[in-house]
Amino acid sequence: AQSVTQLDSHVSVSEGTPVLLRCNYSSSYSPSLFWYVQHPNKGLQLLLKYTSAATLVKGINGFEAEFKKSETSFHLTKPSAHMSDAAEYFCVVTSTGTASKLTFGTGTRLQVTL
Amino acid sequence: DAGVIQSPRHEVTEMGQEVTLRCKPISGHNSLFWYRQTMMRGLELLIYFNNNVPIDDSGMPEDRFSAKMPNASFSTLKIQPSEPRDSAVYFCASLGLAGGTDTQYFGPGTRLTVL
């Protein structure tokens, strides 16, 4: 069984300040973890993924995430928020060894203010 | 690279009408997925195909929904008859390798409104 919990449904930050979006997972086997971003009226775009290589994963647009097995967490961070980062972010897990069976979190809406 | 292509982008129809959503996966991808996104239920997997064969359709809500993949470059999701509760954004995704591991790539979605 696998599941993912996004701890915040909504996060608001000021432009230029750090971003932290929290995600905890549960998995029976070694998981693969993903972060997807969805801008308004758009499809989901892959930000980054962890697949048992380096625990610190760098993605597009300056985002990164760290896999912490002891804490079963995969939090998404960015040092400095930009207005264009405002979107919905989904943490996703699969433990089947393939990305065919994904389990999505409920999403975190990131608001960036001036 | 054109990405996953979906049509139409928006569809407004009346209850009882047939609706057909279309998807063209990324060339070379062997698996295709249909998802539905609503505020209440989030993202739900409806069905997925591997090499044009339906593998898991346990997420299809009821017999009014059907999906086909007649060839590797085209799939349809049909709702007949449509109901207001079917209003949602429907996404298609295809599965391919990226950096040595497989990854799902999503289309832009079809926003369906059933009046």
Image (spheres, grey):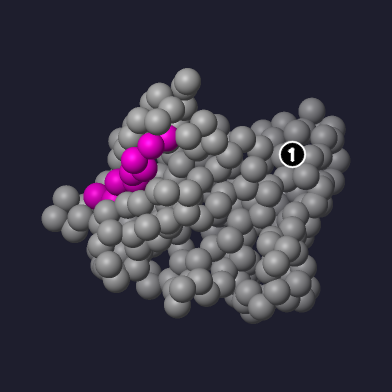
Quadrant of res B4: bottom right
Number of numbered callouts drawn: 1
Magenta-drawn stretch contains A1: no
Say what secondary structure mark 1 lies in.
Answer: strand
Quadrant of res B23: bottom right
Residue A53 lies, with reference to residue B115, above or below; the image says below
Q: Which residue is mark 1?
A: B112
First to last magenta residue range:
A73-81
Q: Main secondary structure of the magenta part?
A: strand
* Towards the viewer: A60 or A108: A60
Q: Quadrant of the N terminus of chain B?
A: bottom right
Residue at (46% x, 67% y) in the render = A99
Residue at (43% x, 28% y) in the render = A15
Residue at (50% x, 71% y) in the render = B98
* Towards the viewer: B73 or B12: B73
- Left or right: A1 as drawn, with respect to A84: left
- Left or right: A2 as drawn, with respect to A34: left
* Towards the viewer: B95 or B98: B98
Residue B49 lies, with reference to residue B63, above or below; the image says below
Quadrant of res B111: top right
Q: In this view of the protein, can residue B45 be seen by the observer?
A: yes
Which chain hosts label 1? B
Q: In this view of the protein, can residue A3 be seen by the observer?
A: no
Farthest-out residue, top: A114
Q: Amino acid at mark 1?
A: Leu
Residue at (25% x, 62% y) in the render = A55
- Left or right: A27 as drawn, with respect to B53: left
Residue A73 lies, in percent from the top left, at: 24, 50
Residue A63 lies, with reference to residue A95, above or below; the image says above
Residue A108 lies, in percent from the top left, at: 42, 35
Residue A111 lies, in percent from the top left, at: 46, 27
